Structure formats: C-alpha cells, structure tokens
Amino acid sequence: MDRDRVRELARVDPAMVAAALLLVGVGLTAIYSATRGRLLEAGTPPTLYLKRQAIYAALGLAVGVLLTVVDYRRLKAYAPAVYALSVLLLLLVLTPVGARRLGAQRWIDVGIFQIQPSELAKVSTTLALAAWLADSPPGSRRGLVGAIGLVGLPALLTFFQPDLGTVLVFMAVLVVAVFLWGVRLRTMLLLAVTGLALGLVALRVGLIHDYQLARLRAFLDPSSDPERAGYNLEQSLITIGSGGLTGKGLFRGTQTNLSFVPVQHTDFIFTVIAEEGGFVAAAGVLILFLVLINRVLKATAVARDPFGRLLAGGVAAILAFQLSVNAGMTMGLAPITGIPLPFVSYGGSSMVASFASLGLVGSITAHRLPRRPAGRR
Amino acid sequence: MSAVSDPHLTRVRVLRAAVAVAVAILATRLWYLQVLEGGYYRQAALTNMVKLVYLPAPRGRILDRTGRPLADVRPSWVVRVSRDPLPGQEILNRLAGVLGITPEELKRRLDQASARLPGYAPAVVAQDVPEEKVFYLAEHEDEFPGVEADTVPVRTYALGSLAANVLGYVGEIGKEGLEAMRARGLDYRPGDVVGQYGLEAQYETDLHGKRGTLKLLVNAAGRVLRELGREDPVPGNDLVLTLDGRIQALAEESLDQTLEAARSVYDRDSGKRLAATGGAVVVLDPKTGGVLALASRPTFDPNEFVLGMSAERWKALTEGPERPLFDRAVAAALPPGSTFKVVTAAAALSSEVFTPSTTVKCPGFFKLGNQTFRDWLPSGHGSVSLRAALVESCDVYFYTAGSRLYELDEKRGAGPGGPEDALPAMARAFGFGRPTGIDLPEEQSGLVPDRAWLRQQWERNRARWCREYAERPSRETEERCLRGWRWYPGYSVNMAIGQGDLAVTPLQLAVAYAALANGGTIYRPHLVQKVVSPSGAVIREVTPKVGGTLPVPPSALAAIRASLAGVTRPPGTAAGAFLGFPLDRIPVAGKTGTAERQGKQPTSWFAAFAPADDPQYVVVAMVEEGGHGAETAAPLVRRVLQGIFGLEPTPVVPGARAD
C-alpha cells in the first residue's frame, strides 16, 4: 500500500505544486515588507506576521498533502456533512458569536485566532456541488435547480455578512461547474440574465450597503471621493504605478513603508509586489497563476470521472476568479471587495482553504488511473 | 471508465482561453500603469510622502511718527485638526469638550474650513485658544491623534479703535481678492490674511511679508516622520506714519465730545435736537502735506475683524445710517458752505473783479433778476470789504462776487469748448473735484459743477427728463428738458457761498487751506512717511509731492490769510468759540461754514490754520447735522488746537449761532 501511495503521489503535477509554493514564497516576502515597519513602530518583532503566515502555509501544506493522499472519490461520501458544517459556521458568523472587523461580520473567534468560515465554505461548497452534479444526468432540470440551491444557500449567508466578493466567487464556481457539467448554452444565458436581474433588484431594495455603492462609484470614478472610498483605489494605483518596470527594490517601496494603502498585507498584497518588484515581479506573479490554473484545468481534462472533472473545474474557477478580482481591483479594473489573493494574501483561513482545494486537485491527478488489483502486485 | 468525451475537452479549452484572456488583460493593465504611466505615479508617490506646511509671515507693523505701534502682531494659539485622515468621532467629541464647544459646532467649523482649504491641509477649528487648554492638549497628546496646536502671528491693534478708519482691518483673502493678486503675479493662497480696508489694504504688499514653508515627510496617517527642509517666513515691512498718535487721540476724543455735546443742543430751524450723526477731523502739516491726524466718527474696533466676525455684526458695521466703515474724513463729499468763500475770494481777486478794498453794501439780501438770495444775518452787515466779508461771513459780498464772475464768464464765452469757468477753475486749482491722492483706498473726489458738467448731465438725462415733460408738462419739467444744460447766474451766486451741487471732503478742504497757509502750494497729502524693513533699513521714503500751485497773486493770498485771522476774534464768527484762547501768543486763522442740506440739519464746518503768521498746523472739522459752523465745528477745532499747542483742552460747549 505504501508503495502505491508513493506512486500515486508522484503522479501529482510538479509544476502545479511549484507554482503554488513560489506564490507562497512571494507572499511571505511581500507580507514581511508590508508589515515590518508598522510592527517595529509598535515595538513588536517585525517578523510577527511573517511567522504566522509561515505557520498557516505549513498547516495548509499538511492539509493539502493529506487530501492528496486520500482518494477524492472517498471524500464524495463526506461532501454533505462537510457542506452542512460550513453552512452552520456561516450561520454562526451572523449570530453574536461572529466577530466584527472593518464593518463586516466575517470571522469567528476561536481563542488565539479567528477563522473565516466563508473561505472554507468555498471549498466545501465546490465539493458538494461537484458531488451533486456528478450524480445528476447532465443538463437535467433537477440537477440544475439543485445546484443553484446548493450554492445559493451559502452565498446568501455570505451576502448578509456582508461579503459581496465571496458571493461572486460562489457564482463563478456555479457557472463554471454547470458549464463543465454539460448544461446547454441557452440555459447558461438564461441563468446569467436572471443573475443580473437579481443583482439589480438587490440594489433597488437597498440590500446593498451604502459603502458598497460608494466603492462601486469610486471604482467607476476614483477621484469622486478620494477621502473615503476612492482613497484605497487611488493609493493602490499610485503604489503599483510608481513601481515602474523593475520596482523600487525589496523593502524600498515608499508607499508600502509609509502605509498609504490600507489592508495592504491582506487584500492589497499585490501592490507591495508591484511597487517593490515592479512590472517584472508583478507580471511574474500573473504568470505563476496562469501556470497554476492551467495545471488545475489539466486535471479537469484528465480526471477519470465527472466528479473529479467538476471538482477540479470548481477549484480552477475559484483561483481564476479570485486572481482576476483581487489583482483587478488593485489596478482599478474591478470594484474593491474583500477577496484575498490565493496563496499570497496574509490570512490563515484563505491559506488553508487554498491548499485544501489544491489538495483535492492533487488527489484527482494522483488517482486518475485505476489502482491495480492487489493480487497482481 | 471511458475516456473523457470530446465535448468536455472543448469546454475545458474554452475555460483555458478565458483564463488566458483574463491574465492578458491584467498584464496589459499592469504594463500601462507601471511602464506607460510610471512617471506620473512616481511623482504622485513623491507628493504623497511630502507635505508642505506653510508658515504665515508676521505682518509688518504700523507705527506713528514717534514709533509708537498702532498695529502690531501678537502670537495666538490655534488648534488644527487633520483632515487626512479625519480623527475618529470619539476624538473629536473629546476635543470639543476641551475647547468648550459642542461637537456639532466643531463639525460646523471643520466643514467650513474644509470648504475653503485646498487638498488635505489641516483645518483650524479654534483660534486664540487659552494657554491652559493648549497645555492640556499637549500633555494628553496620545488621546488626540490628528489634533495639533501651535501659535500663529495675528494682527492686533494695540490702541483699540484709535485711527481705525486710517489703519483699516485685515481678514482672510476672498475669491476675487485672490484672483486679483494672482493676476498681478503675486503669490497669494486661500486662507491668507490680507488688508481689507485702510492702510492695511493700501500697503498690503509691503505689510504682507513672505510666507515660509516646512517640508515634512509624513506617513499615510499624517504622522510627521521627519523634517525635510525649512524656509523661514520673512516678516512684512513696517509702515512709519506721519500720523501723530497723540494728536490723533486728541482729535478723536474732541470729536466724540463734540458729537455728544451737540446732541443735547436744540436746533431752532428743525425744531429738534441736533442729530450730530457723525463727523471728521483732519490735521495736516501745511508744509509737507503729511497727515497728523485723520479722525472719523462713528468708527469701529479693527480687532473685531482679526478672528473673523459674524454676518450680523458685519451687517451692522456696513449697513444702516451709521456706517462706521465709511471714512468720513476722505469719503464724505458734502457742500462746504462758507468755508468755500476763500476760494470765491481768490477767484474774485485774481480775476480782478474785486480788489481787497472793494466794498459791497449788504442789506441782508441780494437780488438777481426776480430771484432773492438771503444773507444768513437778515439785518445785513452794512458796507463790507474783503476782510469784513470773511470775518463776519457776509453772504451778500460773495453773492455779488459770484454774480460778477458769472458775467465775466459770459463775456469770455466760458463753457464747453471755451475757457474754463472762473470760479470752478479756481475750485479745481484748490484741489476740489478730484482725489487728493492720499494713500488710502477709499477716497472720494467730490464734485465741482460747471457749465461743461451741467451739459454733460443734461445730455445724459435728457431722454428721461423730456419723457417726464411729455407726461407731466409743467414749467419745471419743461425747463429741465429744454434748458437743463443752461448755467444760470444763480448757480454761480449759490456756488460762491459753497452751496449747490458743490461737494468736498474734509481732507480736500484741509489740503486747500494748507495751500492758503503755505503760500499757494497744493501738497498731495500722505499718511506713510517711510517703509522700513524688519531689520530697520529704510526701503522707501515719501517725499512731499506737489500737486499744483494756486494761480493767485501772493498779495491776494496774504489778504485772505490776514482776514481769516480776524475770524477767531470779535466780531468774527468764531470769536465765541475762541474765547479765552491765547490768540495773542498763538493767532488762529479760520473760517466757519454752515452748509444747508435738503431734509437734514446743516453740516457744521470749521477750517483753520495756526499760528496764523507762521502756519504749522491745518485743522479741519466737519460735523454731520451739527448745526452752524460756529456753534459745533469751531469749538471742536479750538479744542484740538489747545491740545496741539500744549494748552489744557477745555470742554466743547456749543457756542454762538453764526455762519
């Protein structure tokens, strides 16, 4: 059995793993650069965030390896339970148990650290969605309605935190999974129109908060209110733009050192890389993501069953959408939402969830061939 | 399990393409921001880090001729609140508590300051903060992030309202002011304090100084990390005035006392007490044109303006009948009454319609055609020569002179296109009808009516006048429409005693009497003697400027001067006012004036110079609705002269009613 396990692990795509680990390395460096000045000023060790993130990464890696070793098909049976647990946690966030930070209720305090259930819900929902669709006849109405309900519930709960960004990630997973499942294009189009209409209704009846509207306006016109919503974006653009082709040098970013960008080590980590490493480093990060996502999509292509295909497709959707929205918002291409850059942004929940999803993909590539019967060893 | 179906692979390919497109868009945007627009953002990052703080320059002082500061600078504590980022509401509430204002008031001040200030400059929320509050804020610095206190130099008028109308006041530069300054190529910024009135406005660029700058390295929280550079402000230059603080105080005090005393006097003609709504006193050095005192009432306290004032207070100062900001000494243009008779005398003597010994019979009235002009003394003055006419202010003598001058004008064909009218020409030679050129921004030019002016008026108003004639035909409207341009002899006769449309300012009258006193030189009056740099170097010195010479033979001027010396002694019109004044030691020459005004009590005038044989001072007083010249203005001038010559100033008791 051990030899089998090793052989299976060896089938895992090395390029995919390398890309992820490189992104973690870049992230650690950027986090250190973004936080050390402030920490020093506060009289704490400058490596505080760096160390924590390293621990998160190690934890995430362990979870990823564990999930790679386990045959993903065996996880299918646990999908409903994991899904139920994350929905429960999402509900818990909305109760007084949830912790409020930066005007939104997204965290649960668990003693020494806080967890962000919506990060874990992304993975568990993808898992449950893949399991459901894999067992439904492609293109069936029942399958589609079930899929919408499955994604809709956590999405709705996340919406009330409010965390609009994660809601959109759920939507992206739904769209990609349903697309790979084999729904007719006409149905896809209908879904898109309905989604858009729902969004407009939410806007009309005031379900969208003022600050979200302000951010949207700031996105459309950064100079409209530079003191509040537009400030983030303006500073973000200055930070990225001033990096130039080759950057100002590691730890030499003036914008970063003087903390002009709020939440720079989490949601705006991309600006640190772009300022200090310039276009060269920032484009390098984009290429690493391109490699990573392509490798995940390759798993989609080679997976031996619909469950694997859909699971890998969902993970690709999460990664691609988070990259686009996170990097896009720092450059003014997308509205500002609280979406982290996978593997790079500071944060334990995001890190563990990212590695977990990658572990699922690893399991798919590792177990893409049928295991030889024991007797023929 | 079968191999992956083809449609599945196609869909995966679609996703692959979508991801490639997304990454390509991100990379393109990155290239645009970092490489194409990199220079712009590098500059933006630089200005992000560096904050410029402007250090206001202390304004130059205004000193009287003895070096006594009339306008000075004092340090004042101000509290500023950072606007980038704005401190939290909790901090603002705490700050409001320390400052003793409501959080709403603090918010209002913040908004008000924000509306005016560009960029993220911290907003001043409190001025003249007591030191103990500043110390409290400094001691509890940690509880007030984003709040700072420091001192700024502010204007202070040490002697309160003394010479307020001369000094003027300062205030924050307005939008138009800013544009005007920038149009002149001057580096002014919103929030700059500038002179708004008086000398403060006239000499703004001398007084302003040059602001300094402080270059600071700051972080996003606005916290100063390091000073990068500093340019200290250069204080403005000082103004040394010709004004004498002592004489100014004396003039103002005398004016106040006179107004108060006059208000208890019953005026027989109007059947009411004298209104004495305001007045002015001018003291000039007749040998240079230097202004020794320039008083105007009602007045104001310029200190009120330093920290800004409420709209209601501003309204009270500028609107309504009192108008304290209206500098009556240089801007009140009124008929001069009999004080003008010296001009008529000069015109009559120099055009030789009269000689000093010409006598005129005065029965108390003067007939011109079917018109009768009355003398102020119904019984008349008997047979009068120049001396008696001036001493007793005989109107008939000057009516006659005016009528003769009219005839002369007619003979010479004076008027538009021809020679100048004799009396108006002499008035202009004395400096009337145009600004004296004093270094104050509010000066008015008054009016000297003549044939040309009358025709101009008629041409301008003819359409309206003729419309009125068409609608309501009457002798009067017909006259105005058809012959409104015509200069009737009555006009010359009326003007000869300083009435009619003639209007002069107290300062103009003082300049005219100075010329009379000094032998015929019209000086341009000035307040500033020199401009001195903070280190004491003289930057500019004002030398007396001659604006013209009277076209009057010296003998005629001497005759007029000699006559005026008799006015303050019996039987002169001002003899009552100068009762007890040591005229033998300090002879005073002067002339009373009582100018009638439609619907109002007469304006009381007195113009004088002393000592009469070697004039050192010219003093002119004007009291609005003050009654006769002899009863109000003459004792006022006497009191000022008493003070100037070191005598005990005696109370102003409104004296005899004589013109």
Image: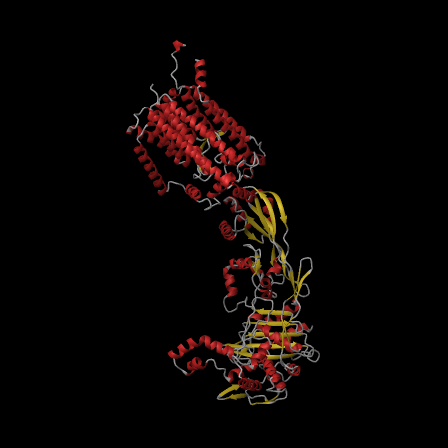
In the rendered view, would you say A131 is above or below B145?
above
Which residue is most to the left?
A141
Q: Which is nearer the eye, B32 or B528?
A: B32
Q: Which is nearer the eye, B299 or A300?
A: A300
In the rendered view, would you say A189 is above or below B303?
above
Q: Which is nearer the eye, A121 or B645?
A: A121
Quadrant of the rendered image containing residue B567: bottom right
Number of numbered discs:
0
Which residue is most to the top?
A375
Q: On the rendered image, what quadrant is the C terminus of chain B found in? A: bottom right
Q: Position of residue A40 (x, y in %)?
A: 58, 34
Q: Position of residue B198 (x, y in %)?
A: 58, 64
Q: On the rendered image, what quadrant is the N terminus of chain B found in? A: top left
The answer to whether residue A308 shows anywhere in this view is yes
* Left or right relative to A60: residue B285: right
Q: Position of residue B152 (x, y in %)?
A: 60, 53
* Left or right relative to A274: residue B211: right
The answer to whether residue B628 shows anywhere in this view is no
Q: Position of residue B414 (x, y in %)?
A: 53, 82
Q: How is the image coloured?
A: secondary structure
In the rendered view, would you say A147 is above or below B516?
above
